[in-house]
Image (cartoon, rainbow, N blue to C red):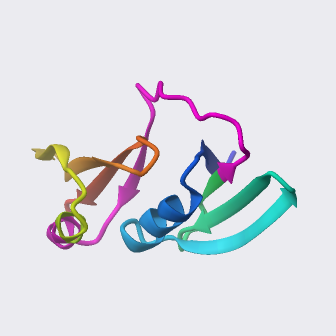
């Protein structure tokens, strides 16, 4: 089984697309509007995993406890400098554990994003 994508419902589509492009490094794979009040953007990494951003005119949930997405980065120091330059608050690290170092940020929707550099 292969996980195809994770869907995030958002009221802030443009800000979310910018976050996942500029901070996470995903690229827009496709973007469309299947109905007048719905917009969808799929952003993809180089391995094929996608984040689906869905704006459908309905209120988004404020209860995002327990949800996070993890993204491996080449240099934790570089991504830490990038998020700080964009005034994105860092929480939960950087933390070193056996095999990796990581920290967390929130995307524009309040989803916890774990950025991780594996030891090589």
10 on left or right of 2: left
Q: Is residue 38 magenta?
A: no
User: Vertically, is 12 above or below 74?
Assistant: above
Q: Is residue 77 magenta?
A: yes
68 on left or right of 46: left
Tell which of 1 and 44 is nearer to you: 44
Q: Quadrant of the N terminus?
A: top right
Residue at 67% from the left image edge and 73% from the top image edge: 29
Q: Quadrant of residue 68?
A: top left
Magenta extent: 54-81
20 on left or right of 37: left
Residue at 21% from the left image edge and 51% from the top image edge: 89
User: Vertically, is 11 above or below 59?
Assistant: below
Q: Quadrant of the C terminus?
A: bottom left
User: Which percent across, then down, holds residue 17?
Assistant: 53, 65
Q: Quadrant of residue 35?
A: bottom right
User: Which percent across, then down, holds residue 75?
Assistant: 21, 71
Tell which of 39 and 25 is nearer to you: 39
User: Vertically, is 35 above or below 14?
Assistant: above
Q: Residue furthest right?
A: 35
Residue at 21% from the left image edge and 49% from the top image edge: 103
User: Which percent across, then down, holds residue 70?
Assistant: 40, 49
User: Vertically, is 104 above or below 39?
Assistant: above
Residue at 55% from the left image edge and 64% from the top image edge: 14
User: Which percent across, then down, holds residue 45?
Assistant: 53, 69
Query: In this view of the protein, can residue 70 be seen by the observer?
Result: yes
Query: In this view of the protein, can residue 99 be seen by the observer?
Result: no
């Amino acid at each position: 089984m292969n996980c195809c994508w994770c869907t995030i419902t958002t009221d802030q589509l443009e800000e979310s697309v910018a976050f996942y492009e500029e901070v996470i490094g995903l690229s827009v794979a496709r973007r469309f509007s299947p109905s007048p009040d719905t917009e969808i953007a799929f952003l993809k990494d180089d391995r094929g995993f996608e984040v689906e951003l869905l704006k459908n005119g309905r209120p988004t949930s404020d209860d995002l406890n327990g949800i996070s997405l993890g993204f491996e980065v080449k240099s934790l120091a570089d991504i830490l400098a990038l998020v700080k330059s964009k005034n994105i608050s860092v929480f939960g690290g950087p933390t070193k554990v056996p095999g990796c170092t990581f920290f967390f940020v929130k995307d524009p929707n309040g989803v916890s994003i774990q950025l991780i550099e594996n030891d090589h």
